[in-house]
Amino acid sequence: MKKGTWYFEDFYVGQEIPLGCRSVTEEEIVAFATQFDPQPFHVDRDAASASIFGEVIASGWHTCSMMMRMVVDSVLGASSSMGSPGLDKVRWQQPVRAGDTLTVSYITTAVKASSSRPDRGVVWSTWQALNQRGEVACIIEGMGMFGRRPKEDGDA
């Protein structure tokens, strides 16, 4: 898809867009956490084995970042996205471990055309990551602003 393919009008309630799968390695878990979330159970194998997790797990922020990349690659990068005013909910329901494969989807939960700015609308969505066992690893709920489809010459 090229830039501008997804417009506000292309989203509808109940729409589920599969974003693909991504496997996670211990090396990338440790590298991300070392830079951004250096808690012992993210960066130290010995400390992690003594934790409630029993092994190194991904930072929740790493999980969100992987999901964000998949949303950009599949939807936002080829859209009329105008950014987002924020997220309403983030839940890390299962730890993400080295060797896990996440399957991510973008589910449209509500849409509303702007009454004050006719060039845009708001799309509410839930992003869901399932691990290879079908367990929900992470859920993100939020909203994004998208440009409306340009009117063709001669449209009223």
Image (cartoon, helix red, strand yellow):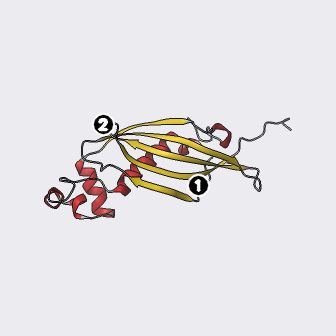
Report the residue marked by disc 2.
Answer: 133
Q: Is residue 3 left or right of residue 46?
A: right
Tell me the quadrant of the picture where the C terminus can be found.
top right
Q: Position of residue 143 (x, y in %)?
A: 58, 52
**Taking 122 as reference, is 67 left or right?**
left
Q: Amino acid at mark 1?
A: Gly
Residue name at image x 62 percent, y 53 percent: 82
Which is more toward the observer, 137 or 119? 137
Quarter that holds the N terminus? top right
Say which residue label 1 marks: 83
Residue 69, horizontal then vertical, whole percent: 44, 47
Q: Nearer the viewer, residue 114 or 53?
A: 53
Distance from label 2 to label 1 (Cα)?
33 Å
Query: On the image, which quarter does residue 150 sit in?
Result: top right
Q: Residue drawn 55% across and 45% down?
A: 76
In the image, residue 57 above or below residue 133: below
Task: Give the x, y percent position of residue 100.
Answer: 28, 42
Which label sits on residue 116?
none
Q: Residues within 10 Å of mark 2 (few under 14, many from 20)?
A: few
State left or right for residue 144 relative to residue 101.
right
Point 33% across, 40% down: residue? 131
Judged left or right of residue 125, residue 128 is left
- Above or below 91: residue 70: above
Amino acid type indicated by mark 2: Arg
